[in-house]
Amino acid sequence: MPYRHKISIASLLVLVCFASAQAEIQVGDKFPVLDASAFEGGTPASTTGLVTLVDFWASWCAPCKLSFPVYAKLQARFESRGLIILAVSADENQAAYNAFVKKEAPPFATVRDKSHQLASQVKVPAMPTCYLLGRDGRVRFVHRGFHGAETDQELRQEIEALLAEPLPQL
Amino acid sequence: MKTNLFRPLAALALATLVLGSFGGCTNPKFVRVQPWERTALADYTMRPDRDPLETTMAEHVYFSRESASGGRGIGGSGCGCN
């Protein structure tokens, strides 16, 4: 193989390496498409035109347990106005995931990202982290960790604000 | 002109490749346990204070040798939650 070709291939490899090291999803970014085939535990409902709260959690994460009752209340209050909650588990252990879901019995959609496909795409910075998406599917607010009543209050205000926004032109 | 530019560019590409390949070993941005991969770290057995008797004995040793007790940090496992 000519020297010049080797250099070209090496440069290409470097570019691929840097391209794969993508940054985490930030406010204003388009959230990745929720691919049902990557999940276990049910297909995510359509989120088109809805305010969506995507929460990344795990059964081994103590603050995640505290967040579920709060999300259940949010679901009860805002569901009729256009809020959908999707809790994405990063559990590797299926039995632990099943036990957690059975115990908490969340009223919102719960799925297991068994191959960590979505978590890797989003580059979740901490467990738990929740992303609040506007009706246009863009990330509008990010909450790293769960801080009890403080997070609850912030989420309520943000959801109210997002629900008040007009539907995007599709 | 073309030949003059090719060699420095080739050297630059090669240097970038080497740095990219070997620099990753020491860069914590590339080598770290991701938050969603901490199942094992969050396990109860990873807690340094999981055995009260061992903790008491270790505290006693620290107190005897270092004339200090307490201040060994906060409890919790390695999940890094919040």
Image: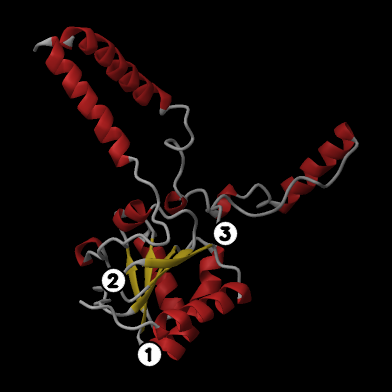
Q: Chain of mark 1?
A: A
Q: A67 or B24, which lies in front?
A: B24
Q: Nearer the viewer, mark 3 or mark 2?
A: 3
Mark 3 and mark 2 on one chain: no
As drawn, the label of residue A69 is none
Report whether mark 2 lies on the same chain as mark 1: yes
Give the number of the disc on residue B82: 3
Using the numbered discs, state the Cα–Cα distance from disc 3 to disc 2 in whole angstroms.
26 Å
**Which picture quadrant has residue A87?**
bottom left
Cβ atoms under marks 2 and 1 closer than 8 Å: no
Q: Amino acid at mark 2?
A: Gly
User: Callout 1: few (<14), some (14-19), or many (20+) C-alpha neighbours within 10 Å?
Assistant: few
| Residue A168 in picture, x, y percent from top left | 28, 78
Packing grade of label 3 (10 A; few <14, some 14-19, many >=20) is: some
Q: Amino acid at mark 1?
A: Arg
Mark 1 and mark 3 on one chain: no
The correct choice, above or below, for A4 with respect to A159 in the image is: above
Q: Position of residue B62 (x, y in %)?
A: 82, 37
Q: Are marks 1 and 3 in contact (CB under 8 Å)?
A: no
Residue at 38% across, 21% down: B19
Disc 1 vs disc 3: which is toward the camera?
1
Residue under pointer 1: A81
Check the image and report above or below for A31 versus A157.
above
